[in-house]
Amino acid sequence: MNRKIAAAVLAGVMAASALAGCGSAGAGGTAPASAAPEDTAAAETEESVAEETAGASADANSLTVWTWDPAFNIYAMKEAEKFYQKDHPDFKLNVVEVLSDDIETKITTAASSGDLSTLPDIFLMQDNSYQKYMTNFPEVFTDLTDSGIDFSKFGEGKRAYSTKDGKNYGVPFDNGAVIAAYRTDYLEQAGLSVDDFTDITWDQYIELGKKVKEATGNPLITSQSGSPDLIMEMLQSCGASLFKEDGTVNIVGNEQLLKALDYYRQMVEAGVLVEVTDWDQYIASIQNGTVSGVVNGCWIIGSITAATDQSGKWAITNMPRLDGVTGAVNYSNNGGSSWAVCTATKNKELAIDFLNGTFGSNVEFYEAILPSSGAIATYLPAGDSDVYSKPQDFFGGDAIYSKIIDFAGKVPSNITGAYYYDARDAVGVALSNVIQSGADLEAELQTAQDTVEFNMGG
Amino acid sequence: MTKGQKAAVYLFLIVISAVCVFPLYWMASSATNNSLDVVRGRMLPGLYLAENFRSILLQQDLFRALINSFRNAIVQTFLAMAVCSVAGYGFEIYHDRAKDALFSVLLLAMMLPFVAIMIPLFRMFSGWHMVNRYMAFVLPSVATPFLIMMFRQAARSFPVEIIEASRVDGLSETGIFLRMFVPTMKATYGAAVTVTFMNSWNSYMWPKVIFQDNNSTTMPMLVANLLGGYTVDYGMLMLGVLICTLPTAIIFFGLQKSFTNGIMGAVKG
């Protein structure tokens, strides 16, 4: 008897939840293009109600933006609002703090349910995620190619992230150009200067690293264990990636990847590179002065300059290049992000005009946000400006910001691929197995390739 | 136990408690240091508490988040107490043939991880235009199988004689619940309040999904935001964590006695 009742209750619950599911799907504004007029009208009222609490701005003079980091992206957006208000006094920007991962989750949820009305007018997206989302949810991104924004003023490597089939879907913002920063006081102890580290190869880097290690006892570089950041940077410095042009996985037999991993292993064996357990330890090694240098995206400067007592003891130059690889240069990229305009926006012209008037063309704006946020532009003309050319005492009086914009312009573009993070994680696992437990490199790379291919198939 | 043995036991306990308390101490002392000192592993309290506080106020709407978190947690705790204690009492005291089957379904619901019901839940609430409303956060946790079970367990130890005597004396069923059951079960309520308040306060996943604007940010969301940047200010972060921890700590220590009694779940005397 009891069993029967339980079964009946369960069936009832399931039926009820199934009905609820259908109900909200109908109410969610998923009306297809061919839907009857009543349906479309219903969907529209639905949308306008949703806008009161979330999603794109309904008011003709305001825009909603999703971004993260109050000291950096949010600050930049709020300054952009002030700049744009000079010519458009009625303009209002509603900046919502949403973490990068959450923006991606929310786009996935909204696009999968076919209801874009909860999305904002403009959102920021990590460059490495762009290809994945443009491939999976092309309906979310507005084509900006003919919007009047001059994309040729941004570095080619940077632009490529948000470009698909020759069309631009993002306004490039912050810079991820790779820098190599060194503690000049430590280099001096080894009788070296930062010039010895400029335009060098990784072979030279390892030799110099041994000298520095001997003189100071400090490694030349630290790396977060299992994080393939450095490997990915090496790959991009020769225009390579973990994918081929047709989108297939390029891990096994990838000559550049093998070379990068080999250098990594050599550095660990020579004690030039020391692995640390996590990101906090990585930052600590820089700020504690237990490492003589850093190779990472230029946003790492914020963490370097936080150690105010090390002012004047740092210098910045370009990163080493892979020897004997065609197309290898001393420039690469790690991180960075670009602004996208969501197709669901009611104020498309305004959104584009706003981005064009600020992030897309305004050197003055880029000058204004640099000192407080350290947000380095990828807009190449900004590099010649006075603010960017100002000598920085922390880095021995070098005009590092102009230098970095110059670096950014020389970064080779590569193929990110829609499965960038899957491939990156798989290589990270391989790297950590090889370094930590001495696993066989070939076998590990085969496993990595299989993993990514499996993910792509599923 | 000889004196030596006793000393050894105490020494052991002191070491263990030091290990347990140390992270809390470090959190508190880090909140008074600047980022650089935290990274460099400074253990002693510093002089940067005011500055960390200023930076957090500058970056985040701290008071709004505190108010939101308190409102959400208090309303949820209050409603959950009202609903779950009645349910638990009813399940134990009244007899019905379908009761056990219903209770099994309830237990089944306890097995479901929250992520499994998150998407249907979101669609339901967005269908009712409750995105960004705090009731959308409160409602799904008003009746939890765990609390109902806890109150049912407590009601089991509630003497039937009291109920029968009260009925004979002409007290209504509601009266019995309110004037007999509730006062006797203070310890259980204390434990339930502690658990519910802490769960509600620390809840992260669901608010993250249902709250989409800055005005609904809760404390755990605020702490997560502090970690979102290229450069993390560890001093400020630790202060945020400290502020986020304090209310639950105060509630726990305040209700500690009834918490332990409530978990034991017995009516004494």
Image (tube, rainbow, N blue to C red):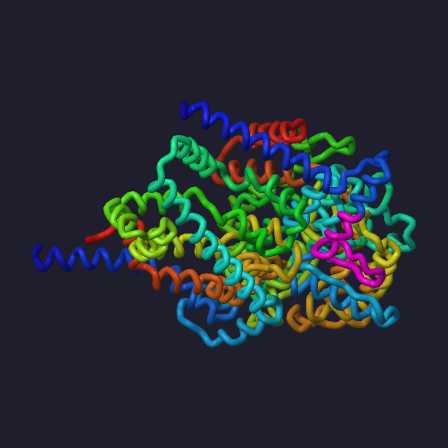
Q: Based on the displayed image, in which of its 4 quarters is residue A431 positioned?
A: top right
Residue B87, percent from left and from top: 41, 45
B240 vs B180, left or right, is: right
Q: Examine the rendering and report whether any part of residue A239 can be seen.
A: no
Q: Based on the displayed image, in which of its 4 quarters is residue A228 positioned?
A: top right
Outermost residue, left direction?
Answer: B2
* Viewer-nearest residue: A370 or B222: B222
Q: Examine the rendering and report whether any part of residue A456 can be seen.
A: yes
B112 vs B265, left or right, is: right
| Residue stretch in magenta | A45-65
For the C terminus of chain A, give its image quadrant: top right
Residue A55, percent from left and from top: 73, 53
Say if A12 sits above or below B51 in the image.
above
Q: At 57% from the left edge and 54% from the top edge, which residue is drawn?
A: B135
Residue B235, percent from left and from top: 51, 67
Asked if residue A58 is among those painted magenta in the image, a careful observer would answer: yes
